[in-house]
Amino acid sequence: MTVEPPAAGPCATHRQAHALGTVLVVLVLAMACLAGCGGSGTSTWTLPGFATPPSRAAVAQARRWSADLVAAIDTVPRTSVFALKDNLSQPMACLRLIALQPGSYLGVYQVGTGNDFVVDLAASHNLRNWREVRTLELNASQPDLVTAGRGFLLAAEATTRASGLGVHNIEVRYYPSVSSLVLGRPSRRLILPHRLAEPGSGIEGTPVVEAADLNGSLDHSTITISFHYLAPGLVDREGIGVLTDFSTWSAGEDEHLDEALIHAGVDGKHGDRSFVPDTGGALEVVEAQRDPGSPWEVYLYDRVSDTVAALRIKTPGASRSFANPAITCVPDPAGTDVAVVTLFLPNQQAGPGEAGELLYYRPSPLCAR
């Protein structure tokens, strides 16, 4: 979703990186660059990723994974945490979390500050109660935090000019240790130039670090980041790119995902997304609007069959709009692997007491392989 003032409610459009799940995508992107993808302009990157036509075995496996995903996400239990807040009573919009170990979790989220947002870091011992640690970034939103080597990568949508001008770029920061993250002291930071939106105007944001291979150091790294951008006609569309050696940024349109959504009749904005854990990059969840101005919904994209299906998420209060989907596999405090689902429920279509960030989790075959 496009950044709005905090009073408007919804997060702007935006995990622990699933490197195994996106190795194939990384290879395809790297091959595209070697074939001559430009460092600027509006190039299109096609990401077939799988055999065409796919084998029966691949189709059957993707269907089983899809069923596991639906079972993990579709019915929200009454024990879920709605309208999630930290210990300072700050709404924790667009939470993305990682596990250091069972019973020790870190999360990043955006907090409204009048006309803009800041990115905060919080800690939890039970996934339900969160204590703010510090503000990591000013004038930024839709953060993503992933482990990378022995350190951490933080990606966020940064406001690079006065908020009223609406110019947003992806900013990436690297923290070499837990202590550097807790102290808010990155060793490296980089603002990525626009590759799809006009340089010096418009929006590229909601970054998701889909895979991060440091190859021993940032200077030899390959980091895959998906994002959205403001396309002509003021419509959000999908992009994906590779940051090489923490210095060279190449990106283009994620044509397959956008076209699959449009073919399914989803013609409004396409926004935040995430690969489904441990599916080899076969499945993604993505927020989108069926028509401009309609409620946000979550769709499942099957990259094997190149098809899209709406997820019918049901809450106790019958909320009707869901944004910023993320699914993360972590051990719960008892050490059981669980699928943690986080979603943002916009005010306008939320059931009683359900507006804001939603967090719930349950054991799932997605996280038990």
Image: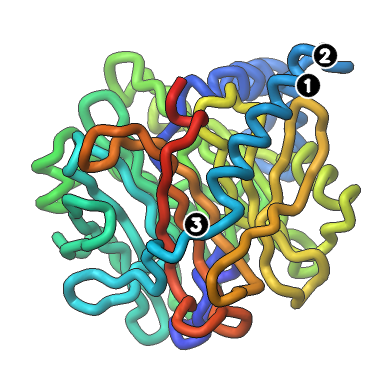
Q: Position of residue 104 (x, y in %)?
A: 17, 43
- Amino acid type assigned to the residue bearing label 3 in the image: Asn
* Disc 3: which residue: 169
- Amino acid type assigned to the residue bearing label 1 in the image: Val
Residue at position x 35%, y 15% from top? Answer: 215
Q: Is residue 263 left or right of residue 107?
A: right
- Residue 201 visible to the viewer: no
Name the quadrant containing residue 303. Answer: top right
* Disc 2: which residue: 56
Residue at position x 20%, y 37% from top? Answer: 102
Q: Position of residue 86 (x, y in %)?
A: 24, 69
* Disc 1: which residue: 59
The reply to whether callout 3 and callout 2 are in contact (CB within 8 Å) is no
Callout 3 secondary element:
strand
Residue 284 in the image: above or below residue 124: above
- Amino acid type assigned to the residue bearing label 2 in the image: Arg
Near mark 3 (Cα within 10 A), the count class, few <14, some 14-19 or many ≥20, is: many
Q: Is residue 263 left or right of residue 102?
A: right
